[in-house]
Amino acid sequence: MRKLFGVIGCPIHHSMSPLMHNDAFKRAGIDAYYHAFHVEKEHLKDAVQGMKALGIAGFNVTIPHKTAIIPFLDEIDEMALQIGAVNTVVNENGRLIGYNTDGEGFVRALCEELNIKLEGKHILLIGAGGAARGIYFSLARSKAACIDLCNRTVSKAEELIHERTIPVLSRAYSIHEAQQLLGNYDIIINTTSVGMYPNVEEMPLSLDNLRKGTVVSDIIYNPLETMLLKEAKRCGAITQNGVGMFVYQGALAFEKWTGIFPDTARMKQMVIQQLG
Ligand code: ATR
């Protein structure tokens, strides 16, 4: 029997997930269909119960439901619980289990696309919001030498550092302090929405002190090249946009549903085609 999958969010009409997953199912020879469902905040509980009642095999969760969905699921994976957000749900024999593949998706994209190892690296995360949480806790599992955070509101960076359970060296800085220290880092990651369409001229911090050869990764994929990445490239940095993270979070969700890790290069090509 054909299995059903999907994504719930609001707005959802621009989602690239159906294209990516339906193609991956086809290539894996799995009889399945993935649909984008528009779910308003006040209908979230009913929607989740409906997914369960209909026997939907699995689904993704996106803005604004990633945190709100937690009480409506039967079980939450430990990492998703620590992050405080779920982006992937697996229906295991009628029980809905929540996972988070965003943070690991980012880390896998960073290491695999750029062919780098995190061991011994000095990393700076810009931002301390929802996206930063997943990335920070996932990075903390690597053998990075330090993972520092900088944020417009420094207290939020401090709070996030206090929540970590793995003892990795981390310091919280203001944006101004981080700008002065920029030359100390091997990898700089923007997790904020600064520079996202339509505010494409904005940058989360200035790159005056950037070292040549530093990796600068931005989780934004609209535009494909943010002002931060343009500027970083100009300074001789190795840059990465947010398409990789999007593709890998999807690939990891697909793997949880099917046991198969899909062709991420193909997924990436499809996403870029749709964005372009
Ligand atoms: P998300 O889930 O996308 O991470 P969020 O939880 O609202 O969204 O977090 C947004 C992040 O972007 C925060 O780190 C936020 O900084 P504050 O904690 O100071 O609010 C940062 N951010 C958003 N707009 C910003 C701006 N114009 N300048 C600097 N930082 C900004």
Image: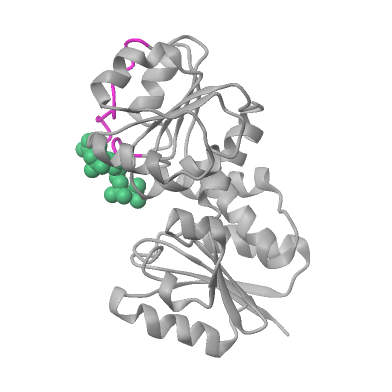
> Foreground residue, 121 or 238?
121
Corner quadrant of residue 161: top left
Image location of residue 186, percent across then percent down: 51, 18
Residue 177 vertical position relative to residue 102 in the rendered view, above or below: above
Question: Which residue is at a point 46% across and 47% down the rendered structure image?
Answer: 275
Using residue 5 as the reference point, say whether residue 229 is left or right of it: left
> Foreground residue, 254 or 223?
254
Magenta stretch bounds: 192-209
Q: Main secondary structure of the magenta part?
A: loop
Residue 222 vertical position relative to residue 66 in the rendered view, above or below: above
In the rendered image, the residue lying farthest to the right is 29
Q: Would you say residue 58 sits in the magenta stretch?
A: no
Q: Would you say residue 196 sits in the magenta stretch?
A: yes
Residue 96 in view: yes
Image location of residue 274, percent across then percent down: 49, 50
Image location of residue 229, percent across then percent down: 41, 25
Residue 70 vertical position relative to residue 171 in the rendered view, above or below: below
Residue 198 in view: no
In the rendered image, the residue lying farthest to the bottom is 53
Question: Which residue is at a point 33% across and 16% down the rendered structure image?
Answer: 207
Image location of residue 4, percent across then percent down: 61, 78
Question: Which residue is at a point 67% across and 67% down the rendered structure image?
Answer: 257
